[in-house]
Image: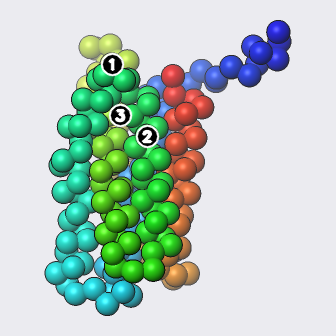
Amino acid sequence: SRFAERSVYKPHMSPLFVIFFTVFIDMVGFGIVIPVLPLYAEHFHATPVQIGWLTGIYSGMQIIFVPILGRLSDRFGRRPILIFSLIGTALGFLIMGRASSLLLLFVARIIDGASGGNISTAQAYIADVSTPENRSRSMGVIGAAFGLGFTFGPMIGGSMSRISCGAPVSFSAGLAAFNRALRYFILR
């Protein structure tokens, strides 16, 4: 009986802290890729136009899939969609880190972009758990996580690119997997 109680125990942590940390990790992972993506694509002899498409395809997929993920999070709950989106992000980074062709880079960016609507779902989660008096403060904290992650990500990516073009991407895949585990085990 005690073992059963312990096995379902989940630490109680503020949802705002968990979402702050996960948005921060998301943005670090995204930002890591920014400085190395053009270099990585050039490794596969990509033209400047192809590099532009490779950079933009992520955002294009988000434009299409963020409303879909938002609707699904309304129907099935925020937590499952946040976890699903992080699995997609980790898979996208993993494919990108192991890519052997320009086509695989595109596939990786499409998968990551299609599952990358987690920021808006995280904001919806915060709106759901915040009181009206604290909602703007909570959204400001999420905005700070976004800015901090996007600040540190390119710095880490640029530093890790000295190892190899794939090292920052593999590190981002690891961050996404860690982030998924964090959301799964801690987020209520």
Q: Nearer the viewer, mark 2 or mark 1?
A: 2
What secondary structure is found at the residue carrying circle 1? helix
- Residue at the (47%, 47%) spot, across then down: 87
- Residue at the (50%, 63%) spot, across then down: 94
Q: Does residue 5 show up? A: yes
Is 143 on the left or on the right of 96, as rendered?
left
Q: Does residue 126 show up? A: no
Q: Earlier in the sequence, mark 2 or mark 3?
A: 2
In this orientation, which residue lies closer to the viewer: 85 or 147? Answer: 85
Q: Is residue 13 above or below residue 84?
A: above
What distance separates the C-alpha of mark 2 from that of mark 3?
Answer: 13 Å
Q: Nearer the viewer, mark 2 or mark 3?
A: 2
Within-10-Å neighbours for mark 2: few <14, some 14–19, many 20+: some
What distance separates the C-alpha of mark 2 from that of mark 1?
Answer: 19 Å
Residue occupied by mark 3 = 122
Residue occupied by mark 2 = 84
